[in-house]
Amino acid sequence: MKKYLHVFTIGLQNTMAYRFNFFTRILFGFIPLMGTIFLWKTIYASKAAGESISGYTLQGMISYYLVITIVDAFTAVSEDDWQIAADIKDGNISQFLLKPLNYLTYRFTLFLSGRAVYTLVALLPVGIFIMCYRHSFYIPVHVSTLGWFMLSICLTGAMQFFLSYTMALLAFWVAEVSTFIFILYAFEYLAGGHVFPLNLLPPAIVQVLDFTPFPYQLFFPVSIYLEQVSGAELARGLVIQSLWVFVLYGLAKWTWSRGIRKYSAVGG
């Protein structure tokens, strides 16, 4: 455990060296968010005051996208997959095979350190943005909602990492994994509810998506915060999230064991 705490500390130091890049990325990330909010304002402008779309009023829709920003800050994988693929491609992974370090745990520790710094740096701009829309930002009625929301965020972060880690391990078989990573991002962006709430889709499509991990990476934790799920539905969603964490962890372990058999060092 001590060695991974040391890795976490090193990860914090390395990430803090590029905190301005994080801050700039966060600021520019608000541009599409503002565009999305203005788009929905235009759509709701043609409707009567208080009228909803699939259960979302204008204030509810703005809250949805603001909470997405919060979930992204805690859970989004930034460059971990690219770094893992580079380690394999450049042969840097050889050093981990000779040390008493589990590569999966090592990379997950670095992921946690990166998220800690990113979230810390994002607090100021995200807080300012929420203050600007404070009249539209939803505050949960029940205090327990925040606890379930944070638990769901932790599960989401684990799902995000294990899925990206597995995708990056394709570098054992192919020279360039960027295509696969971009395809995964596209599915996460669309099927996860980043572009629009999944409630807007036909029920048949939503039922199909429920068999994938994508709705539980973003849409489900946002729904918890907005108190759209509760009771048995909340418990069921958290159980499914936990199952996906175990499935994706097992897939990551299996892919590593298969890939390492094909690995041959070509560099440092």
Image: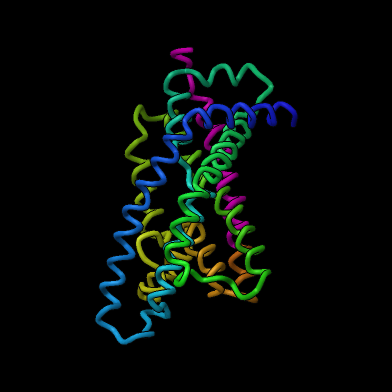
Q: Residue at x 41, y 62 (%)?
A: 193
Magenta residues, dominant SS class: helix
Query: Which of the pair 53/39 is nearer the observer?
Result: 39
Q: Residue at x 38, y 82 (%)?
A: 52
What number of labels is visible? 0
* Residue 244 is inside the magenta segment: yes
Q: Residue at x 53, y 75 (%)?
A: 228
Q: Position of residue 156 (x, y in %)?
A: 55, 53
Q: Which residues are magenta?
A: 240-268
Relative to 83, is 210 above or below? below
Q: Position of residue 124 (x, y in %)?
A: 50, 49
Q: Residue at x 32, y 52 (%)?
A: 31
Q: Position of residue 241 (x, y in %)?
A: 58, 59
Relative to 186, is 89 above or below? above
Q: Position of residue 79 (x, y in %)?
A: 44, 36
Display coloring: rainbow
Query: Which of the pair 5/155 is nearer the observer?
Result: 5
Rendering quarter of residue 267: top left
* Residue 242 is inside the magenta segment: yes
For the N terminus, which image quadrant? top right
Relative to 126, is 177 above or below? above
Q: Residue furthest right?
A: 2
Query: Which of the pair 183/63 is nearer the observer?
Result: 63
